[in-house]
Image (cartoon, helix red, strand yellow):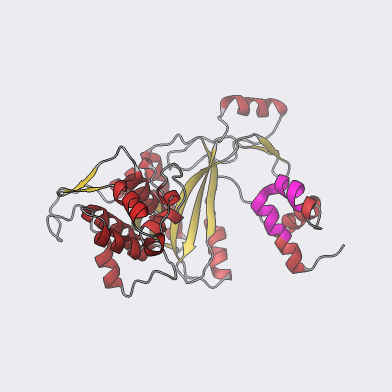
Amino acid sequence: MRYSKKEHDIFMYQYIQGGAELYEDFQRANTVCPSKRTIQRSLQKKAQSFEEGKLLIHELVEFLDRNNLPKVVVLSEDATKINGQVEYDHNRRRTCGLVAPIMENGMPQCNIFEATSPLKIIQDINNYPVGRNVYVCMAQPLEEGAPSFCVQYFCSDNRFSTQDVSNRWDFFDREFSAEGVHVVGKSTDGDPRAIGAMLDAMEMPNLVQSIYGEHFCAKAHIKSVLLQDPTHTSNKLRVKVLKKDAELILGKYKVSRVHLEQLIDKIDKTVHGLSATDINESDKMKFQPAEKMAQQRVIDALHDEIPDSDATVLYLTMMKDIMEVFIKNSSRDVVSPTEAVVKIW
């Protein structure tokens, strides 16, 4: 059976998103579609194989030039868990899935798992841990609608230091600058080692008197803007307020999930839009409840209907302002840069 290019691309996308096993067991069992081998051959023709651990700076420059994008990017990195296993790469003749040691520049060592002999493979498996995480760094060009580009990925056992992160970022800055690419910002999740590297780069707390006043404790001029991923930030604020054993005090008022529980119990859902599942603290990765909690109608309902909820109102307003400034959405609109600065300050 022949498929159109559009149909073929749809099946290829499903294969990439779900993996070979899901495609074979679910997709082919329920629809008429190309075989797994056909999809794999198409991927080999279209996809480019990138070396693990290598900084793909030259490939990024080619990508920017080919798509007429500015050489101005924001770097964003994060780690995600994987089902760790050791595999053999037939094309590159090397072992995959092991964690390479970190060098002095913070980069993982490349080309050390070449399968030159069966003995070498056994020694590598015995001497190096299996990666349980994959660490990915993406470059986002600063143009509306521009796709992001993966500039590095590598297996990790989550054993690295704040200094390793700082060294790797310094290496990034040198390499990107040499190729004429300006890194205006770096964004990560809330990993304490990445946050520590940010604090070191901003020299916080800076005890030297700042030209901006005594309350400004960061270095005024840094190479790039450093920020925690706003989605993670918003979600952590949600998890924090929902903890039953946490007590957040603002002045003489408490920030408490009790106020949200009272709102759900006493006020009709059509007023605030919340349900009991939205304040379930067990699911820490779900972002939609954070968006619902920070809606203006929730804040207004708390202010008008729930006594002594002033601190919770202020807390949710802070969450709302963070989302309006940093997370683009058709329902959230910041009018001007001045308004954005006021909200994040």
The magenta-colored residue range is 11-27
Instruction: Give residue 49's position: percent from left, percent from top.
Output: 65, 52
Which quadrant, please, contains the N terminus? bottom right
Q: Residue at x 73, y 42 (%)?
A: 90
Instruction: Give residue 50's position: percent from left, percent from top.
Output: 62, 51
Vertical placement of residue 10 versus 152, above or below? below
In-image side of 28 versus 215 (left or right): right
In-image side of 263 versus 43 (left or right): left
Q: Residue at x 24, y 57 (%)?
A: 314
Q: Residue at x 40, y 40 (%)?
A: 164
The answer to whether residue 178 is magenta is: no
In-image side of 22 versus 220 (left or right): right
Q: Nearer the viewer, residue 249 or 64?
A: 249
Instruction: Give residue 318's position: percent from left, percent from top.
Output: 28, 58
Vertical placement of residue 298 versus 169, above or below? below
Q: Nearer the viewer, residue 260 or 290?
A: 260
The answer to whether residue 21 is magenta is: yes
Q: Classify residue 112 by image quadrant.
A: top right
Residue 173 visible? The answer is no
Question: Residue extending furthest right?
Answer: 1
Q: Classify residue 63 by image quadrant.
A: bottom right
Vertical placement of residue 266 versus 71, above or below? above
Question: Residue extending furthest bottom?
Answer: 335
Q: Nearer the viewer, residue 33 or 243?
A: 243
- Magenta stretch, main secondary structure, is helix
Residue 290 visible? The answer is yes
Instruction: Give residue 135's position: percent from left, percent from top.
Output: 51, 45
Q: Nearer the viewer, residue 160 or 79?
A: 79
Q: How many marks?
A: 0
Q: Residue at x 40, y 60 (%)?
A: 269
Which quadrant, please, contains the C terminus? bottom left
